[in-house]
Image (spheres, rainbow, N blue to C red):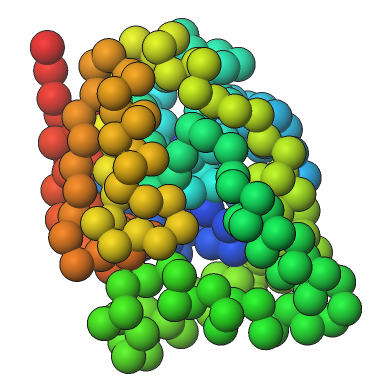
C-alpha cells in the first residue's frame, strides 16, 4: 500500500523495537512503521535529529517514556513535520530530586559492572504488580535491556537527566495528540499526563486500568486499538 501513514515509534529507556511488537504487527495495514534506535546517543537533541533523519517530510510520531521526551524535542525542532503525536507514559516536567538520585545511583551501579542488577531492580516499577509473574513479559523486558547494554543505558540516563522542561512548549503543539498511560504507572503517574493533556489544545487523554509503565506490552490490544483510532481520526 502506498497510502499508509509513515509512523515513527520511539522506545523508552532500555527498550527497543520489541516494545512495539503487537503494534508493528497489527497496525501494518495502515502505517509504514519505523522504530528509532536510541542506544548510541547521549542527549535528546541528537535523538530527535536521528528521528527526523529516518522519517519522510510528514509523519505521525509516538513515543513512550524516554521516547516521549524525544518526541517532545522533535516537536520543538520540527513541529511542521509531525501530523499527529502520541505521548505515552511520559511527562513534560523535569524529574524530582528523588528520581534524579535514583537515576544517578543506577548509573553508578552500571559503571561498577553490575549492570545485570539494574533491570531486576526496575521491573517492579515498569509493570503492574500482577504482571511480575508473567515470565514471557519479564523475559522480553530483560532481553531488551541486555540488547541496549550497559553503555547504552548510561548514555540514555544521561540524556534523560539533561533533558529540558517541555511544559512551556505544550501550548505550541497544534497537531492531533493522544496522551496515554497506565493507571498504575509508578514512574510517570497519571497526574503528569493530565498536565500534558491540559496543555495541548487538540489532545485526548486515555488511561488504561490495571496497567503500569508499559501499555504496549501489558495491554497490547487496548494500546493498539487506541493508536488505530488516533491514526484514523479525521476532523
Q: Residue at x 32, y 79 (%)?
A: 129
Rendered view: 91 above or below 124: above
Quadrant of the rendering where the C terminus is positioned: top left
149 to the left or right of 145? right
Q: Where residue 170 sits: x, y (%)?
A: 43, 18
The picture places residue 116, in percent across and down from the top left corner, at 69, 84
Residue drawn at (19%, 67%) of the image: 210
Q: Residue at x 48, y 33 (%)?
A: 92
* Residue that extends furthest to the front in the rendered view of this protein: 97
Residue 41 visible within the image = no
- Above/below status of 64 relative to 18: above
Q: Quadrant of residue 112?
A: bottom right
Q: Is residue 11 left or right of residue 47?
A: left
Residue farthest toward the right in the current orientation of the protein: 112
| Image spot of residue 115 (x, y percent) | 74, 79
Q: Nearer the viewer, residue 151 or 167?
A: 167
Q: 55 or 118, which is in the foreground?
A: 118
Q: Position of residue 83 (x, y in %)?
A: 35, 17
Q: Which residue is rendered at x = 44% and y = 9% of the image?
A: 172
Q: Can you say whether 228 is above or below 201 in the image? A: below
165 displayed left or right of 205: right
Hey, which quadrant is residue 15 in on the image?
bottom right
Amino acid at each position: 500500500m502506498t497510502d499508509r501513514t509513515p509512523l515513527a515509534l520511539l522506545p523508552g529507556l532500555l527498550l527497543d523495537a520489541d516494545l512495539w511488537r503487537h503494534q508493528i504487527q497489527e497496525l501494518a495495514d495502515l502505517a509504514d512503521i519505523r522504530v528509532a534506535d536510541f542506544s548510541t546517543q547521549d542527549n535528546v537533541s541528537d535523538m530527535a535529529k536521528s528521528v527526523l533523519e529516518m522519517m519522510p517530510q510528514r509523519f505521525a510520531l509516538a513515543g513512550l517514556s524516554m521516547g516521549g521526551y524525544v518526541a517532545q524535542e522533535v516537536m520543538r525542532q520540527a513541529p511542521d513535520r509531525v501530523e499527529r503525536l502520541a505521548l505515552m507514559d511520559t511527562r513534560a516536567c523535569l524529574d524530582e530530586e528523588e528520581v534524579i538520585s535514583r537515576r544517578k545511583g543506577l548509573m553508578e551501579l552500571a559503571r561498577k559492572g553490575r549492570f545485570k542488577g539494574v533491570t531486576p531492580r526496575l521491573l517492579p516499577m515498569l509493570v503492574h504488580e500482577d504482571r511480575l509473574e508473567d515470565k514471557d513479559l519479564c523475559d522480553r523486558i530483560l532481553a531488551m535491556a541486555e540488547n541496549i547494554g550497559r553503555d547504552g543505558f548510561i548514555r540514555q540516563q544521561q540524556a534523560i537527566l539533561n533533558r529540558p522542561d517541555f511544559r512551556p512548549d505544550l501550548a505550541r503543539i497544534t497537531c492531533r495528540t493522544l496522551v496515554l498511560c497506565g493507571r498504575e504507572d509508578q514512574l510517570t503517574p497519571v497526574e503528569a499526563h493530565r498536565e500534558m493533556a491540559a496543555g495541548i489544545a487538540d489532545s485526548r487523554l486515555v488511561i488504561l486500568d490495571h496497567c503500569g509503565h508499559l501499555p504496549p506490552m501489558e495491554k497490547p490490544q487496548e494500546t493498539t486499538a487506541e493508536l488505530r483510532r488516533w491514526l484514523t481520526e479525521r476532523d
